[in-house]
Amino acid sequence: MKRILLLPVLFLLLSACNKKEVVAPNFNVAIAQGKTTFKVGEQIDFTFSGNSNYITFYSGETGRMYEFRDRITAGARTDIGVPIQNMTTQLLTYPYSYTEEGTYKVTFVVSNTSVYGSVSDVKEIVLSITP
């Protein structure tokens, strides 16, 4: 009798250990206006296609640069991104406008995450903002 009960428990344990892979995000970002030079205050419409669980936006402005995301000063992170999509929302466009002229490296970090892990990808666009 004990052997009969032991078999289903063993089967459940072995099937629970079956590791699944996280699917890499299939993601693309484009600018709806089809250009990379904008005026200060002009709205830029980023459009998204593909699938991802999470999207984080780094505008390239001071305090929002992707390349400094791991820098810590006085116990606090200095550059952080803005989470614009999570697993419960679907975002097709994201509007943004700059208040100062300059050249900005816009970065979108996308990831698919599950209990089995996380797979991320980074997309970058360089924008010129003129007066």
Image (spheres, rainbow, N blue to C red):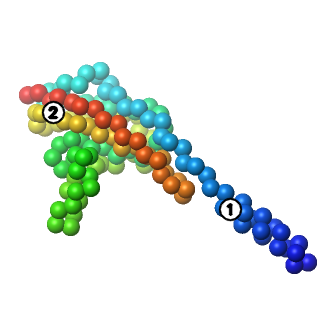
Contact between labelled residues 2 and 1, with CB atoms less than 8 Å apart: no
Q: Position of residue 73 (x, y in %)?
A: 17, 62
Q: Nearer the viewer, residue 56 or 73?
A: 73
Residue 115 placement: quadrant: bottom right
Location of residue 39 with respect to 81 vertically, above or below? above
| Image quarter in which the C terminus is found | top left
Q: Position of residue 79 (x, y in %)?
A: 22, 52
- Residue that protrudes farthest toward the right in the picture: 1
Of the pair 45 and 117, the residue shown nearer to us: 117
Residue 106 x %, y %? 26, 37
Q: Considering the image in quadrants, where does the N terminus appear?
A: bottom right
**Residue at which label 2 appears:** 103
Q: Is residue 7 visible?
A: yes
Q: Does residue 88 appear in the picture of this structure?
A: no
Asked which secondary structure carries label 2, the reply is strand
Where, by quadrant of the figure, is residue 12 drawn? bottom right
Q: Is residue 37 left or right of residue 18?
A: left
Q: Is residue 125 above or below residue 86?
A: above
Give the residue at mark 1: 16
